[in-house]
Amino acid sequence: MPSHYIERILRARVYDVAKETPLNLAKQLSERTGNTVYLKREDLQPVFSFKLRGAYNRITQIPVEARERGVITASAGNHAQGVALSAHLLGIKATIVMPKTTPPIKVRSVRRLGGKPVLHGDSYDDAYQHALTLAGEHGQTFIHPFDDPEVIAGQGTIAAEILRQHPAPIDAIFVPIGGGGLIGGVAAYVKYVRPETKIVGVEPEDAACMHAALAAGKRVSLQQVGLFADGVAVRQVGVETFKLAKLYVDEVILVSTDEICAAIKDIFEDTRTIAEPAGALSVAGLKKYVQRESCSGKSLVAIESGANINFDRLRHVAERAELGEQREALLAVEIPERPGSFHQFCKLLGRRSITEFNYRYADSRNAQVFAGIEIAGDEERKDLIARLNEHGYPVTDMTDNEVAKLHIRYMVGGHAPGLKNELLYRFEFPERPGSLFDFLTRLGRSWNISLFHYRNHGSAYGRVLMGIQVSGQDKEKLQGLLEKMGYPFAEETANPAYQLFAGTDQITAG
Ligand SMILES: Cc1ncc(COP(=O)(O)O)c(C=O)c1O
């Protein structure tokens, strides 16, 4: 089997459209993991992913008499662009069936590359079935995204480049898996030329169709697939790709969404480019492998397979990257409801950076603070919780709590009926480690803080919204103190957003 693939890979025609991409040393990742890490930069291809290699190779094999009738495929992602561009360059008409839910930007980019988009159905499966029907009716050649020997061979040219670019031994190559076309081609080539090099597949935990198939010994169809890494959101691996994986893939590692986000950040730090989630999978898997094996001094290659990401997803990526790196702990901490207790709690956190601080008065005895704290890793999180417990603060660890991460952090607050004399202020202070503690120190310990919201958004200025209980005669004293503290501030007690959603008495608009 491999020799038949080796021949196909060696004669694959991809360089009319694809580039030989660089194999870059990732300096920071290498230092951090204690290994030599290289990135195969498929994000630098003309349509920002490797998919045009397989698509072009497949389309060039179409007999002359069938070219007239054109090609057809179903895809809303990188394969669609690969097929559209390849067909255009070969002067062949391309129809791309996409689910109706496809974002307009992707539909436009297919059109821009010379393809004809057809919107059909609500899911990929609907679009796929429709593409097969149209192919039957009009005689177009269906270009499968992964389960086709010529597509697999086109993707396999990446392996030929890697081994040429790095003649010295490679301990392992990490490859993202969707339907398995990329890993099929890479594994077949590498195992023939350098069988000692490990081939490690990487899938998201919630779209692990190859992992499930290898465990079951047969292709299985997942009921549901996670869409975060949309490039690899596939329900079932191919017949041919499964055969190849059984023969040549050493193992498949699964990673979480947060770990993928952390890997996007790692790639950014080394290359100043932004990978799409599927494109960063290999780096997430590499890190997990290094941690599990405690290996050092090895030569490791990760295929950075694509960079087609919508800009507005970056907010989510940045938010989750710290959690994926285990660099942020999310804790619910119970503190006594009395003046000065906030300050005391902050003091225990030391000079650690606080990423989030969220609190709303609930009753007169104890307060629950939702706190995000920057940490160096899992050990530090455990030490910090132990230290807080020793000082009498009960802690609930929410670092792995999806409901907390996705929802509750945005919902802390609400009205505090019955709370008397609350004034609301907004502050700004220059962002640096310890700045929140300094702020509380300057405020002093005599005020009761009844509402607090702070979130480090990575900007130069930290913004705090704070409610303080102040009786009539103390208001002037507080005003004087706030002016002396030297931070820009404004009173917001009359702000309708506060009155409607967080004030001391529930009111209605109008
Ligand atoms: C960026 C990216 N990475 C990885 C893959 C997975 O490739 P395959 O389906 O051949 O396993 C895809 C598939 O479209 C992709 O777009």
Image: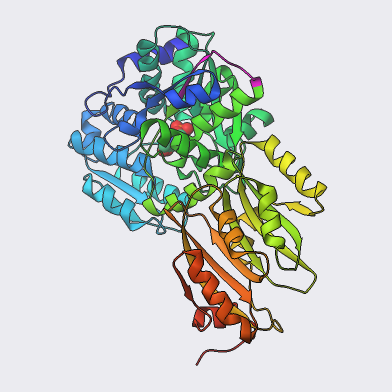
Viewer can see residue 104: yes
Q: Position of residue 30 (x, y in %)?
A: 48, 22
Residue occupying image coordinates x 36% and y 37% = 273
What segment is highlighted magenta in the picture? 293-302
Front in this rendered view, residue 104 or 360: 360
Indicate the position of residue 413 as horizontal and vertical percent values. Answer: 63, 71
Which of the 4 image quadrants contains residue 294?
top right
Q: Is residue 127 left or right of residue 11?
A: right
Pick out the residue farthest to the left: 91
**Image color mode:** rainbow
Foreground residue, 306 or 387?
387
Query: Can you give x and y, in whole percent of width and height, for residue 112 in the image?
Result: 22, 48
Image vertical order of residue 189 relative to residue 304, above or below: above
**In which quadrant of this rendering is ligand 1 seen?**
top left
Q: Is residue 300 magenta?
A: yes
For residue 265, side relative to residue 506 (left or right): left
Residue 365 vs 79, above or below: the answer is below
Q: What is the tally of numbered marks visible in this picture?
A: 0
Can see residue 500? no
Q: Is residue 122 magenta?
A: no
Q: Say above or below: 359 vs 187.
A: below
Q: Quarter-wise, where is residue 268 in the image?
A: top left
Q: Residue furthest bottom?
A: 510
Q: Quadrant of residue 47?
A: top left
Q: Residue at x 42, y 51 (%)?
A: 127
Instruction: Say which residue appears at 61% left-offset and 17% top-offset.
Output: 295
